[in-house]
Image (cartoon, helix red, strand yellow):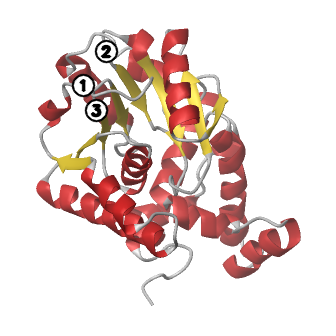
Amino acid sequence: MSPSSSPVAVVGCGLMGSGIAEVLARAGRSVLVHEVDAGAAGRGRARIEASVSRAVRSGKLDEAQGGEVLGRIEVGTDLDALASAELVIEAASEDEAVKTELFRRLDALLLRDDAVLASNTSSIPIMKLGTATKRPEQVVGLHFFNPVPVLALVEVVPSLLTSEDTVKRVSHLAEDELGKTVIRSQDRAGFIVNALLVPYLLSGVRMLESGFASARDIDAGMVKGCAHPMGPLQLSDLIGLDTVKAIAESLYAEFKEPLYSPPPMLLRMVDAGLLGRKSGRGFYDYAR
């Protein structure tokens, strides 16, 4: 997938979607970003502008480059505006019903027969998304990691029906245009990283829940004792506890292993809206 006059589209402009749009624009791509309403679109645009401003302040971009990046990104609310895209990267909420319906609608409106539909899902089987379309051979997982402009990894996840040409096209984009490291996973819930990571995060929650140790001591143990950049509870707050819960439920539904089952404390915190950094409070209080 080489640079062309056809734009790349991103559906969703939250933490992940805004980061994906930014790295695409930094690579010289024109990017169409879709959000559900004007309020969400405004927040998404502001999120991208804040990230680009940080890059300028840190010297990663100069002022002119920052302006060019922002000039390549258009954020709107009309899904039909994505019809000319050669690639659509879905970064909507981690909800199978929402994503499946979105893939059905995108498949119907895309004008290019060779257009690729990619999902940034961290846990939902790509096969389920592909079979919601008439082009399952052009549906693939393209899983970025937060923060997208900083973390170098992308998981490419083909389903049993994804063509090798589709895999090559998105791998070329991620590696050669965006400068990411690509790893390829089978289409299993959680893929490579979250299948390894989420049981570790849930173990931290269970340790806190049982009174074994405090949140700060659990996290300090992994940071100071294992040289992790942050502990499991801090990382869960960064990811979002609702996202951790959704991934855990997908893993448990597929494998039926108890270690994948979300602990009651996690379920109650999500019910209470204590989602971590994005809500201002999770295992730690960020509102202070």
Locate residue 184 relative to residue 172 in the image: left or right: right
**Mark 1, residue position:** 106
In front of the other: 234 or 23: 23
- Whichever of callouts 1 and 2 sits on the residue coming sooner in the sequence is 1
Q: Where is residue 64 in the image (x, y as percent from the top left)?
A: 35, 63
Q: Which amino acid does label 2 sit on?
A: Thr
Closest to the camera, between mark 2 and mark 3, is 3
From mark 2 to mark 3, how far is it between C-alphas? 21 Å
Residue bearing the label numbered 2: 133
Marks 1 and 2 close (CB-CB < 8 Å)? yes
Which circle, 1 or 3, is nearer the viewer? 3
Type of amino acid at the residue the image marks with label 3 = Pro
Q: Which residue is drawn at 83% across and 67% down?
A: 227
The residue that mark 3 highlights is 7
Q: In this rendered view, identify the residue nearer to me: 255 or 88.
A: 88
The residue lying toward the viewer, choosing from 24 and 215, is 24
Please state, as top left, top right, bottom left or bottom right, where the N terminus lies in the image: top left
Callout 2 secondary element: loop
Query: What is the C-alpha distance between the residues marked 1 and 2?
Result: 8 Å
**What's the amino acid at mark 1?**
Leu
Give above or below for 164 relative to 278. above
